[in-house]
Image (tube, rainbow, N blue to C red):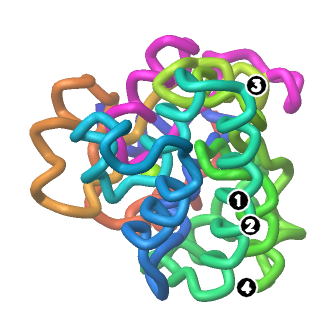
């Protein structure tokens, strides 16, 4: 399908946050946040499996905390939200994201941010750059339930319900394989935003309806009326 064909019947846009909207850690370091979270795990570094000991992805540390204990999960979730909100103050906007969001809204489509990041961080960023009033809703990670994050469809389903929509009239736009897998599971259309060429193969494997390389493409095509 072409991007125009995908967007034609779409009334509701489910938009991933870190990637299509901004680089959350654009002005800070996800590695540092992962380390801070890891240091909250009990038992010291020898008690942590190698992949978790070396990951630069704080979300992976959160997932791991959930298999350890509820106490550690709660502790890490709270610290993670604080770190994400802090990162949002220096997050860097994705090129043409503002224009794409504005054009989608002007065309009469709703926009719901669907993110594995915390709603607090998403709202803080949108408020900071003056986009909060354009976005219809924010569905972030469910606190202390990392198992519900994308690629599970739960967050998308919550967004679809929030908009009183039908999955068929929704599209998910995301830059990760998990966004596309979640869209497939929820029954929505899927646009893969390939923000780094290295991701092309991985995103293609999830069979999105269309792949784009710039949010500017959304800006141009969303000006066509909804069919
Ligand atoms: Mg992303």
| Mark 4 within 8 Å of ligand 1, using the beta carbon | no
Q: Which mark is residue 160?
A: 3
Alpha-carbon span between mark 4 and mark 3? 25 Å
Q: Is residue 18 above or below residue 185?
A: below
Task: Tell me the SS state at disc 4.
Answer: helix
Quadrant where the C terminus sits is top right
Quadrant where the N terminus sits is top left
Where residue 182 appears, as percent x and y from the top left, is 49, 23
Which residues lie in the magenta part? 161-188
Task: Tell me the SS state at disc 2.
Answer: helix
Alpha-carbon span between mark 3 and mark 1? 29 Å
For marks 4 and 3 on the same chain, the one whose residue lies earlier in the sequence: 4
Q: Residues within 10 Å of mark 2 (few under 14, many from 20)?
A: some
Where residue 23 appears, as percent x and y from the top left, is 46, 72
Where residue 22 appears, as percent x and y from the top left, is 52, 71
For label 4, the residue is: 129
Determine whether, in the image, residue 160 is placed left or right of residue 27.
right
Q: Which mark is residue 79?
A: 1
For label 2, the residue is: 82
For marks 3 and 1 on the same chain, the one whose residue lies earlier in the sequence: 1
Q: Is residue 212 above or below residue 62?
A: below
């Amino acid at each position: 399908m072409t991007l125009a064909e995908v967007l034609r019947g779409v009334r509701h846009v489910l938009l991933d946050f870190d990637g299509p909207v901004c680089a959350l850690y654009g002005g800070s370091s996800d590695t540092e946040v992962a380390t801070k979270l890891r240091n909250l795990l009990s038992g010291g570094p020898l008690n942590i499996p190698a992949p978790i000991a070396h990951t630069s992805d704080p979300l992976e540390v959160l997932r791991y905390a959930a298999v350890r204990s509820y106490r550690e999960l709660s502790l890490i979730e709270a610290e993670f939200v604080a770190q994400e909100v802090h990162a949002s103050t220096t997050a860097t906007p994705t090129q043409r994201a503002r224009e794409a969001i504005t054009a989608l809204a002007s065309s009469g489509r709703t926009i719901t941010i669907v993110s594995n990041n915390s709603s607090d961080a998403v709202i803080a960023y949108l408020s900071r750059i003056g986009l909060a009033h354009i976005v219809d809703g924010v569905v972030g990670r469910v606190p202390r339930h990392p198992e519900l994050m994308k690629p599970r469809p739960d967050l998308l389903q919550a967004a679809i319900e929030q908009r009183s929509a039908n999955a068929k009239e929704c599209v998910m736009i995301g830059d990760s394989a998990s966004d596309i897998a979640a869209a497939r599971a929820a029954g929505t259309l899927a646009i893969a935003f390939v923000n780094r060429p290295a991701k092309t193969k991985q995103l293609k494997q999830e069979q999105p309806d269309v792949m784009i390389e710039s949010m500017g493409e959304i800006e141009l095509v969303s000006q066509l009326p909804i069919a």
